Image: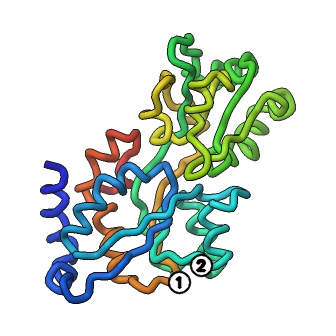
C-alpha cells in the first residue's frame, strides 16, 4: 500500500519525465545518509528505483563528528555522492565549505532527541527540566551519539543545565553505523545506564525501553534535510529523490520512526 501511494505521489512531483526516459537514461544515484533518516529512505527508495529506472547506491555515515565515516569527512577526502541526507545544520555547513550546492537543501523531517533505558529497568522521570536534570545526575553512566545529538549534549545542553563537570566522567560518546551501532544497543547490553539519541534511532532497537523525548524546552530543534552535492553527476535524479522524500508519501513512515513532517505540510 505504501509503495503504491508513493508511486502515485511521484507522478505529481515532476518525476514523470524520468519515468519516460528511464529505460534510456537510467543511472546510478549515489546517496550519503545518516542513520536517523535511513529507515524512511529504505522504505521509499525501491519505489523511486522502480518508477524512474535509476539505481540508488547508499553510503551510511553520521552527519558530523570525527569519525572517518562522517559524511563531511567522506566528502572532504573525495568520496563521491549526488545527494546527502543528514542533519540540516550539518548540510548548511557543507554549503559553506563548497561541498553542497547553495539553494538545493530540502527539509525532510523534524526530529526530537529521546532517551532509553535497558528493558526491564525503571523508567526515570524526565517530564520536566528539573526532573531531567536530576535523572542525569543520578545516573551511573550516560551514553549519547558522536554525531549531531551528542555534540548538542556535550557542547550546549550539559553546560546549559550547569552539570557539565558532574557528568563528564560518566558520559560516553558512541560511534554510530556503519562501523558502530546505535546508542540503544550499548544500553541494551548494560554498558551504560541511560542513552540519548535521535528518537528515530532508538525506537526499533531490541532490549531497551523508550522513556520518551527530552523536555521540549531542551530540544535542539534538529531536522533532517537533503541537499545536492556540488560534484553531483545526477542532479536531476537527486532532486527527484528529495522531492519524493519531502512529500506526503513519506508521512506514515516518518511517524512510524518517531519523526514529524516538515513545518507547513
- Asked if residue 233 is positioned above or below residue 197 in the image, the reply reads below
| Percent x, y of residue 11 | 15, 71
Residue 123: where, in percent of width, then height? 54, 15
Q: Nearer the viewer, residue 58 or 161?
A: 58
Decide: marks 1, 2 in contact (CB < 8 A)?
A: yes
Q: Position of residue 229 (x, y in %)?
A: 51, 78
Give the x, y percent position of residue 245: 33, 61
Name the residue beneath numbered marker 2: 99
Mark 2 closeness class: few <14, some 14–19, many ≥20 residues within 10 Å = many
On-image quarter of the C terminus: bottom left
- Position of 252 with respect to 195 (left or right) is left
Whether residue 211 can be seen here: yes
Residue named by callout 1: 230
The answer to whether 15 appears left or right of 153 in the picture is left
Horizontal side of 73 relative to 24 (left or right) equals right
- For label 1, count other residues whose C-alpha is less than 10 Å away and answer few (under 14), some (14-19) or many (20+): some
Q: Nearer the viewer, residue 80 or 224?
A: 80
Element under disc 1: loop
Provide the secondary structure element on which disc 2 rests.
loop
119 vs 144, left or right, is left
Which residue is rendered at x = 41% and y = 53% of the image? 109
Amino acid at each position: 500500500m505504501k509503495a503504491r501511494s508513493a508511486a502515485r505521489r511521484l507522478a505529481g512531483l515532476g518525476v514523470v519525465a524520468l519515468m519516460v526516459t528511464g529505460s534510456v537514461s537510467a543511472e546510478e544515484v549515489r546517496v550519503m545518509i545518516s542513520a536517523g533518516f535511513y529507515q524512511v529512505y529504505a522504505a521509499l527508495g525501491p519505489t523511486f528505483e522502480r518508477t524512474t529506472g535509476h539505481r540508488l547506491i547508499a553510503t551510511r555515515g553520521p552527519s558530523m563528528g570525527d569519525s572517518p565515516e562522517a559524511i563531511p569527512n567522506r566528502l572532504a577526502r573525495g568520496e563521491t555522492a549526488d545527494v546527502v541526507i543528514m542533519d540540516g545544520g550539518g548540510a548548511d555547513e557543507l554549503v559553506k565549505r563548497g561541498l553542497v550546492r547553495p539553494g538545493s537543501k530540502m527539509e525532510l523531517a523534524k526530529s526530537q532527541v529521546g532517551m532509553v533505558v535497558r528493558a526491564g529497568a525503571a523508567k526515570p522521570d524526565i517530564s520536566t527540566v528539573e526532573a531531567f536534570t536530576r535523572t542525569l545526575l543520578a545516573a551511573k553512566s550516560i551514553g549519547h551519539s558522536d554525531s549531531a545529538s551528542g555534540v548538542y549534549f556535550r557542547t550546549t545542553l550539559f553546560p546549559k543545565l550547569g552539570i557539565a563537570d558532574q557528568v563528564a566522567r560518566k558520559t560516553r560518546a558512541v560511534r554510530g553505523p556503519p562501523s558502530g551501532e546505535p546508542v540503544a544497543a550499548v544500553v541494551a547490553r548494560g554498558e551504560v545506564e541511560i542513552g540519548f539519541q535521535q528518537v528515530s534511532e532508538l525506537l526499533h532497537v531490541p532490549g531497551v525501553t523508550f522513556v520518551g523525548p527530552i523536555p521540549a524546552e531542551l530540544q535542539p530543534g534538529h531536522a533532517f534535510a537533503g541537499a545536492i552535492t556540488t560534484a553531483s553527476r545526477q542532479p536531476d535524479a537527486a532532486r527527484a529523490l528529495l522531492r519524493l522524500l519531502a512529500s506526503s508519501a513519506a508521512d506514515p513512515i516518518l511517524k512510524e520512526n518517531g519523526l514529524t513532517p516538515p513545518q507547513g505540510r
